Image: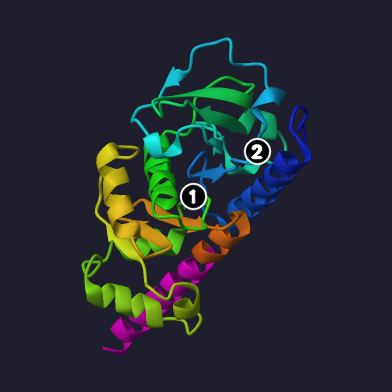
Amino acid sequence: MNYAGLSFGLEEVAGEIAEVSQYIWESGWSAANGGNLSVDVTGLAHLEDFDVFGFPPLPLMVAAPALAGRCLFVTVSGSRFRDVPKCPEQTLMLLHISDSGEGYRVLWGGTGGGNPTMEFTPHLKVHAYLRTVGLRQKVVLHTHPVHIIAATHLPEYGTPAFGRLLEVSMSTAKVFLPAGVGMVGALEMGSETLADATVEAMKGRSAVLWRRHGCVAVGTDVFDAFDLTDMLEKAAQMYLLCRAAKSLAD
């Protein structure tokens, strides 16, 4: 793994991202280049360590004034979680959001070329929400867990009853997700519409489902976000098993 150019604090976070990326791949939540992740590392990134400020910032798809001056690790568009442990310098980018909140500079990474994840707009909007309301979470993790996606195909998806049944499918689900999960319909990937709907559904919660698309979880660190997703995926699996058993019994 190549972390050349990163301080000890940033290298530590990048190592945690690499570790969790391996777990995501082994869990089957990321077919091909599916899924993406971002981590707010403001305070760990010292701008004087990076010689990139002689160039104008690249434009963001949406302005994020709440993130002005902040730094984020973001997965590169088209990259695979399974490749992060092997080549973090190609699959991750360290970005600095401009003081206007309208652009960004690449401080580190993305050595193979490319752009931030295609879901960057939802990531930006969720991070902006977290910072605006002063929450502790600094990680936004989007994955494609099989049982979660399967459950969102059911006709009862999106109803309060679906949320309640998901919560009680495993006794520990309520502990990890006391406010339940938010639910969003099938919206265009990476769109501002999807981003806004995700933020609205995230209010008071730590996880949101995207219909036929996957899950978004926020956490204080990458392990926290992974654990929330893992618990939700197990709850969805149990829910589907119980639903199938009831259908057979009927």
Q: Amino acid at mark 2?
A: Asp
Q: Is residue 187 left or right of residue 35?
A: left
Mark 1 Cα-neighbour bin, 10 Å: few <14, some 14–19, many ≥20: many
SS for callout 2? helix
Q: Which residues are magenta?
A: 230-250
Residue 98 visible in rendering = yes
Rendered location of residue 91, percent (x, y): 61, 33
Is residue 234 a member of the stretch shown in magenta?
yes
Q: Residue at x 60, y 54 (%)?
A: 222
Residue shown at 41% from the left, 26% from the top: 100
- Residue 235: quadrant of the picture: bottom left
Q: Position of residue 213 (x, y in %)?
A: 36, 51
- The residue beneath circle 1 is 140
Q: Which residue is mark 2?
A: 83
Q: Determine the image quadrant of residue 42.
A: top right
Camera sees residue 109 = no
The answer to which image quadrant residue 179 occupies is bottom left
